[in-house]
Image (cartoon, rainbow, N blue to C red):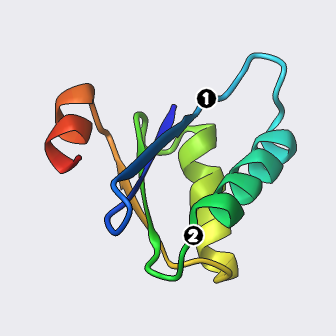
Amino acid sequence: TYCFFNDESDFLDALCLQEKDDPADFHKKLSLKCDELDQGDGILIFCDIPGGSPANQAQILQAQGKHALHIISGCNLIMVLEAY
């Protein structure tokens, strides 16, 4: 599960990896979500498991450099709420 937080707009959104999603499908969904949310300030992405498929796809997207992504993995609900 990803939570997206954009500091300027107080915007929080989530994207979940579904059972039917393969990594390429999730990468596409993640890229579209970043296109939707990025207002030029970058995006903070929280993910639950370091090294899991969602975290890996976020790192690939980060390396592509289209968006200024900041990834925090190993997160729990309390960390997300504190950041928000």
Determine whether 35 is above or below 40 in the image: above
Secondary element under disc 2, as helix, strand or loop, is loop
**Whole-percent x, y for residue 73 in the image:** 37, 47
The residue type indicated by label 1 comes to Cys
In this picture, residue 73 sits left or right of residue 31: left
Which is nearer the eye, 27 or 33? 33
User: Closer to the observer: label 1 or label 2?
Assistant: 2
The residue type indicated by label 2 comes to Asp
Determine whether 19 is above or below 8 in the image: above
- Circle 2 is placed at which residue position? 38
Secondary element under disc 1, as helix, strand or loop, is loop
Q: Which mark is residue 3?
A: none
Q: Report how far apart the C-alphas of labels 1 and 2 lie in the structure.
A: 18 Å
In this picture, residue 38 sits left or right of residue 49: right
Which residue does the image show at 68% across and 81% down from the upper left? 66
In this picture, residue 54 sits left or right of residue 43: right
The mark that comes first in sequence, 1 or 2, is 1
**Whole-percent x, y for residue 36 in the image:** 67, 60
- Residue located farthest toward the front when viewing the structure as drawn: 9
Q: Residues within 10 Å of mark 2 (few under 14, many from 20)?
A: some
Q: Which mark is residue 16?
A: 1
In this picture, residue 27 sits left or right of residue 2: right
Determine whether 31 is above or below 46 in the image: below
Q: Quadrant of residue 79?
A: top left
Which residue does the image show at 59% across and 57% down from the upper left? 58
- Residue located farthest toward the top when viewing the structure as drawn: 19
Which residue does the image show at 85% across and 46% down from the upper left? 24
